[in-house]
Amino acid sequence: MDPIHICGGYSLDGETWVQGSKNAVLPILAAAVLTDGITTLTHCPRIADVHCMLRLLRSIGCMVEWTDGRIVIDARQITSVSLPEEYVTRMRSSVILMGAVLGRKRRVTISYPGGCVIGKRPIDMHLKAFSHMGVQLCENGNALTAWTKRLVGSEIALPFPSVGATENVILASVLAEGESVIRGAAREPEIEALCDFLVCAGADIVREEDGGTIRIRGVERLHSCTYRIPADRIVAGTYLLGCMAAGGRIRLRGTDAGALGAVLDTIRQMGGECECGAAEITLTAPERPRAVPYIRTAVYPGYPTDLQSQLLAALAVADGDSVVEETIFENRYRVVPELCKMGADIQIEEKKAVIRGVRELRGCAVTAQELRGGAALCMAALAAKGDTYIGNRHFIDRGYEALETDIRSLGGRI
Ligand code: UD1
């Protein structure tokens, strides 16, 4: 695959529509397995992870049609409860099929999931929650079988608001017997989207206390429904941070500023001016961003770990020194040596990145190590003088459906 070639050092000026959310569509595709009917999803992003999830759905008997942004899933016949390792190990989100298939068939076999190499990413909380619901677990090499005669609603207190564990428990609870209560649940907007979709399909779910407690009363069956996937807040944030690095003015359409709270606060701190309309954001970036003395990644509504690498790219050219602390994943600084090749001055001290802002970056050949780090290199390349070639673009294709077209629409030279 050819590298992405960006000729940078020019400020941005343009607008683009924001694609559907990767982190919303994947759990919702898994949730379609619970429905004894037809699910129609619109505004689905055309990304590699969606292809992979659809392959997994087909492998267990779902009929799937995908035209443009519309995916139709007929899950009336589930013929297998065994998920093929080849696709499971390609992406982390495959783990949420566990709750969905268990919920529907009371049995599932899955290998340990893969995904971006950004940390250890265990699934102990998911498995413990399933055990509370009466599920037995048996490991055989890399394969894990979970089964139960009776899936019973239960009170589950998560020790950390894990996004994946919250999704898995919701999926397992929707068709279980009785009521489940999840305490310490993740509050990310993608959890809200999953609950909205399930309620639209007939589930009985109530989110309380700002989303931290979720009550699910099991129902007999879920029915057909149509649902629109919300805009991808991480893609929106990526382009906003690209504009902060390169300068200029961009407008993002079809996106909700509400889901980007901490990101917009950080951009304002860096000197960006954000105007938020009903479903659009316009950013006017300063010539050079201001440094951010200290910021840490956190669970929602904090600053998202998925936009940490892109923030490093913008802070690399900031006026002054910044410190970024990564608190969610331990291996999320793989982009740093690549940014340093472009002239950034970033030192890693355990969980912290210390960034001494430089006046300019320069283009060179770099390599994406994972999805968000790869996107960050593209944003840095927009700011860097000269030509940057970003290799391993397949990582970036996992999450960005039209990076080239979007960058071109935003005034970048790609
Ligand atoms: C995480 C992000 C999510 C992002 C996704 C894709 C957070 C809180 N979650 O979700 O916003 O979209 O990556 O990059 O920012 N953990 C355990 N045991 C478990 C489950 C998780 O120890 O059973 C730990 C993880 O190692 C990690 C933390 O909890 O340190 C967050 O994990 P989790 O939210 O589950 O990760 P994802 O669902 O992958």
Image (cartoon, rainbow, N blue to C red):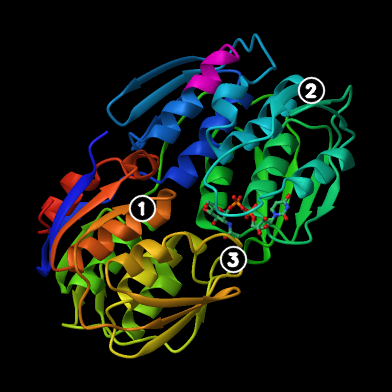
Instruction: Decide whether residue 59 is among the magenta residues.
Output: yes
Task: Find residue 328 and report its horizontal and vertical position in percent.
Answer: 61, 64
Q: Quadrant of the N terminus?
A: top left
Local SS, label 1: helix
Q: Please state which of the two labelled residues, at mark 2 or mark 1, is closer to the viewer.
A: 1
Task: Find residue 240 and report its horizontal and vertical position in percent.
Answer: 28, 66
Distance from label 2 to label 1 (Cα)? 39 Å
Indicate if the residue with disc 3 has its beta carbon within 8 Å of ligand 1.
Answer: yes
Is the magenta region chiefly helix, strand or loop?
Answer: helix
Ranked by sequence position, the earlier of labels 3 and 2 is 2
Local SS, label 2: loop
Residue 83, compared with residue 211, is above or below; it is above
Looking at the image, which is closer to me, 275 or 376?
A: 376
- At x 45% / y 66%, what residue is drawn? 308
Residue designated by label 3: 299
Looking at the image, which is closer to me, 300 or 305?
A: 305
Magenta stretch: give its range. 55-61
Q: What residue type is labelled 3?
A: Val
Badge 1 density bin: few <14, some 14–19, many ≥20, Cα 10 Å: many
Residue 32, compared with residue 16, is above or below; it is above
Residue 106 tag number: 2
